Amino acid sequence: MRAPVFFASCLAVAVAVAVAACGEASPDKQPTPPEAIQSPGVWLTTNGSYEVYLVWVTGPQTGMDNVVRMNIRPLGNATLPLQQLTVTPWMTVHGHGSGNVQPLVESRLDSAAGIYLVSNIFFVMSGPWDLKIALTDGTTSGAVVIPVTVPGI
């Protein structure tokens, strides 16, 4: 009969230590799930740079129309809106993309503020993918590659 009491005591101590170690969250910062935002990509230009962040609206998943909100932040003398923006899903480890399915970049959110909606992103299989993002700001062209992990089913 002592084992359940000992186990309950150990569990209570472990929970108390875990809660104390967490500290308090800053009230002005909302927690963001780690899978919601991909690591930023950075495009360096001669007059500044751009940071590109992805926030998944749907996905990333296989066999569906994935949608992502793309936030592009200019740094230095880099300017917005961009003249051209294309997105290409590419699975480097297998050397292929998504076939004839081409993502659709929409500037309807706020291209002057660097916020774009990209839909029709199709991943044909799970695993490590890259989103190759080609940018043109009117004078310079460049690319950002952001790794995306598509989970298995």
Image: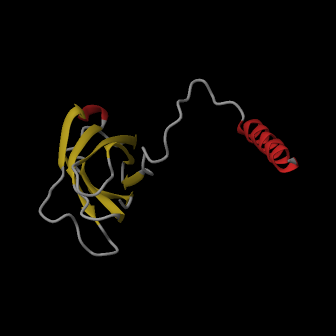
- The quadrant where residue 71 appears: top left
Near-viewer residue (18 or 103) = 18
Near-viewer residue (33 or 137) = 33
Can residue 42 be seen from the camera position used here? yes
* For residue 59, above or below residue 109: below
Can residue 138 be seen from the camera position used here? no
x then y, percent, for residue 9? 83, 42
- Residue farthest toward the front in the current orientation of the protein: 1
Q: Is residue 18 left or right of residue 81?
A: right
Near-viewer residue (136 or 61) = 61
x then y, percent, for residue 48? 39, 47
x then y, percent, for residue 125? 28, 65
Near-viewer residue (78 or 130) = 130
x then y, percent, for residue 32? 49, 38
Q: Residue at x 73, y 36 (%)?
A: 19
Image quarter where the C terminus lies is bottom left
- Residue farthest toward the top in the current orientation of the protein: 27
